[in-house]
Image (spheres, grey):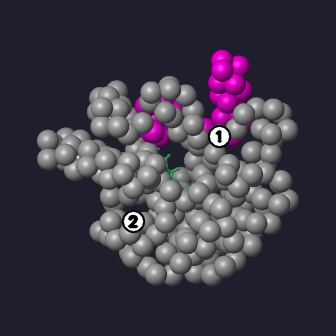
């Protein structure tokens, strides 16, 4: 397994403001295998916990390297499978990693996917939030109860699902909905980021609507951590 990092950009600053860690499976014969092919299976058999712990540690290691090399690091988010939210294990694992690598909590952000409105998930999220983690609501707009979850769960930021952004942009009705979601996020003091942005037109529309943070192929694809490190170094030199 290998950690890839996909940069998140600010449209107005035109610079990297964060990254998301995404797993890749480098199979000796079959080549690169993407997570959609194996995550559902390992979520069934429980192996997802081990894989996520590995990814979280890789991110901590990366952040530590930046700190040691004096390269200004941005927050990096990890995916937290909902399997973790069934008990407290993940809290201990995260605390132990933060302590062992001696990195600020603020640089490790947690992405939680909105699914059904589940009190257990809200409770765990609340707990994580109380001990100082930044919580990102992943795939906003892909489910049915996004708005309920926003009320119940103390997220810091919403990540608009790729399909949601695409669907909403192609009609005037959709654009009103998208604009109002951006407005709502602002009024709730929530950060907002659009995922899967691929075109200049999307960037311009998002900018006009006041959604400044984006992640998508338009700016950069997920890349090996070494390549992301080089990008950060370059940005540091330009600053
Ligand atoms: P996600 O968390 O919604 O991650 C975003 C996905 O969108 C990534 O797919 C990314 O490569 C892709 N993407 C980003 N920008 C664009 C774009 O402009 N166009 C298109 N077509 N795609 C774009 P990826 O890496 O294949 O991951 C798929 C899903 O697998 C992720 O969706 C996430 O739910 C899950 N996943 C990935 N890595 C991990 C992990 O380490 N742990 C867990 N639990 N889940 C993971
Ligand atoms: Ca994610
Ligand atoms: Ca997503």
Q: How many other residues sit within 10 Å of disc 1, few (<14), some (14-19) or many (≥20)?
A: some
Q: Secondary structure at mark 1?
A: loop
In the image, 109 versus 19, the foreground residue is 109
In percent of width and height, residue 75 lies at 63, 45
Which residues make up the magenta segment?
213-239
In this view, the residue farthest toward the left is 172
Q: Residue at x 38, y 75 (%)?
A: 116
Q: Residue at x 34, y 65 (%)?
A: 146
Task: Measure the C-alpha gap from mark 1 to mark 2.
Answer: 25 Å
Report the side of 147 relative to 55 (left or right): left
Quarter that holds the N terminus: bottom right
Report the side of 175 relative to 217 (left or right): left
Q: Which residue is mark 2?
A: 150
Q: Secondary structure at mark 2?
A: helix
Q: Which residue is mark 1?
A: 74
Relative height, residue 44 to residue 138 (above, below): below
**Residue 233 within the magenta-colored segment of the rendering:** yes
């Amino acid at each position: 397994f290998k950690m890839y990092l996909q940069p998140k950009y600010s449209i107005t600053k035109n610079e990297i403001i964060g990254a998301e860690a995404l797993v890749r499976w480098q199979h000796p014969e079959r080549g690169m295998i993407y997570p959609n092919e194996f995550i559902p299976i390992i979520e069934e058999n429980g192996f997802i916990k081990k894989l996520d712990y590995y990814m979280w540690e890789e991110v901590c290691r990366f952040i530590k390297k930046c700190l040691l090399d004096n390269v200004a690091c941005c927050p990096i988010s990890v995916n937290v499978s909902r399997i973790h939210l069934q008990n407290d294990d993940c809290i201990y694992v995260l605390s132990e990693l933060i302590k062992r690598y001696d990195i600020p909590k603020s640089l490790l952000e947690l992405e939680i996917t909105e699914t059904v409105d589940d009190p257990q998930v809200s409770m765990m999220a609340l707990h994580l939030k109380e001990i100082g983690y930044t919580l990102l609501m992943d795939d906003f707009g892909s489910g049915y109860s996004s708005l309920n979850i926003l009320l119940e769960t103390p997220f810091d930021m919403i990540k608009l699902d790729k399909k949601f952004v695409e669907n909403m942009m192609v009609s005037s009705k959709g654009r009103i909905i998208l604009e109002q979601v951006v407005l709502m996020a602002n009024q709730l003091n929530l950060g907002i980021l659009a995922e899967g942005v691929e075109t200049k037109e999307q960037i311009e529309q998002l900018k006009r609507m006041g959604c400044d943070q984006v992640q998508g192929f338009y700016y950069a694809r997920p890349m090996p951590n070494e390549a992301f490190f080089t990008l950060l170094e370059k940005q540091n030199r330009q600053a």
